[in-house]
């Protein structure tokens, strides 16, 4: 996919404000090397959308809209800091890899991971993305979407196979989403990587919305009738502890 040239030029302008608090049109032209008319047009659009703000002196600075974005990013990253000690405890007690993810538009992004006892080839790595329908941890986020948003997502998404167990049937996906929300966890087998399994639970923010997901993952053969009940209990307990520290006042669900 080719990168949109206008988007690149827009970012070139916005990135100038990493080093400069205020810039005039002439200064932006000088720093970017772009034609004055192009810069003028881009600035106009950015100002109209609230990304840039004109000062009384006629220069430009970043708009207050970035304050909202900054708070959102900060809130999401604070989940990572709070979750890390709980993730370590979960990893140490079960020996499985532990993953933390957040939603980024129609994808899930892994923001923290701790490896298990065994060096298992799994899909999850920090910074890696997955569609919301594939794998236990991404799907737990989708399970807690509002009904209309979830329906819209399922209708639009094209289900692609990543591994032998990837859900590629929309009816089955909807059944899994309803089951996950009802039971407070979800489980996956070979959905993102063959011969692996994962169990995930939701992490709630103080406002009651799901802000992240936590999962354990490892070899599929380790996820059997004798281990799964304990695995589920521990993952849900950990998710609840993190949610509680984030200010969530809800009750434990089926723990």
Image (cartoon, grey):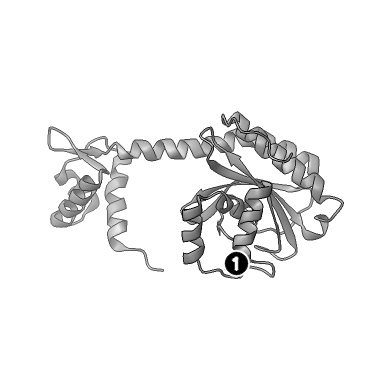
Task: Report the quarter where the N terminus lies.
Answer: bottom left
Q: Is residue 135 above or below residue 63?
A: below
Q: Of 148 and 79, which appears nearest the observer?
A: 148
Residue 2, located in which quarter of the rendered image?
bottom left
Q: Of 79 and 207, which appears nearest the observer?
A: 207
Q: How many marks?
A: 1
Does 7 sit left or right of 172 as displayed?
left
Q: Which residue is mark 1?
A: 171
Which residue is outermost to the right? 226
Does 68 sit left or right of 242 as displayed?
left
Q: Residue at x 17, y 54 (%)?
A: 41
Q: Is residue 5 above or below residue 16?
A: below
Q: Of 69 and 155, which appears nearest the observer?
A: 155
Residue 99: x percent and y percent?
Answer: 65, 47
Residue 3: x percent and y percent?
Answer: 36, 64
Residue 181: x percent and y percent?
Answer: 63, 49
Residue 202: x percent and y percent?
Answer: 62, 44
Q: Of 93 and 251, which appears nearest the observer?
A: 251
Mark 1 residue crowding within 10 angstroms, few (<14) / some (14–19) / many (20+): few
Quick check: can you spot residue 73?
A: yes
Q: Residue at x 82, y 59 (%)?
A: 221
Q: Is residue 163 above or below residue 85?
A: below
Task: Report the quarter where the C terminus lies.
Answer: top right
Q: Residue at x 27, y 56 (%)?
A: 9
Quick check: can you spot residue 91?
A: no
Does 32 sit left or right of 146 as displayed?
left
Label 1's element? helix
């Amino acid at each position: 996919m080719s990168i949109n040239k206008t988007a690149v030029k827009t970012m070139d302008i916005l990135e100038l404000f990493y080093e400069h608090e205020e810039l005039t049109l002439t200064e932006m032209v000088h720093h970017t090397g772009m034609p004055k008319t192009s810069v003028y047009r881009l600035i106009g659009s950015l100002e109209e959308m609230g990304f840039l703000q004109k000062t009384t002196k006629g220069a430009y600075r970043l708009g207050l809209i970035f304050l909202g974005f900054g708070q959102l990013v900060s809130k999401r990253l604070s989940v990572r800091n709070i979750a890390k000690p709980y993730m370590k405890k979960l990893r140490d007690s079960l020996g499985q890899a532990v993953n933390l993810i957040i939603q980024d538009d129609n994808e899930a992004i892994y923001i923290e991971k701790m490896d298990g006892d065994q060096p298992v080839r799994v899909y999850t790595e920090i910074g890696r993305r997955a569609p919301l329908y594939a794998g236990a941890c991404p799907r737990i986020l989708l399970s807690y979407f509002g009904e209309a948003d979830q329906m819209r997502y399922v209708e639009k998404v094209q289900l692609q196979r990543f591994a032998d167990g990837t859900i590629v049937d929309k009816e089955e996906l909807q059944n899994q989403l309803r089951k996950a929300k009802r039971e407070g966890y979800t489980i996956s087998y070979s959905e993102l990587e063959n011969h692996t399994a994962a169990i995930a639970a939701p992490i709630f923010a103080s406002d009651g919305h799901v802000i992240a997901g936590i999962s354990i993952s490892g070899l599929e053969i380790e996820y059997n009738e004798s281990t799964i009940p304990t695995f589920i209990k521990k993952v849900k307990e950990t998710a609840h502890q993190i949610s509680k520290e984030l200010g969530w006042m809800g009750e434990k669900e089926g723990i």
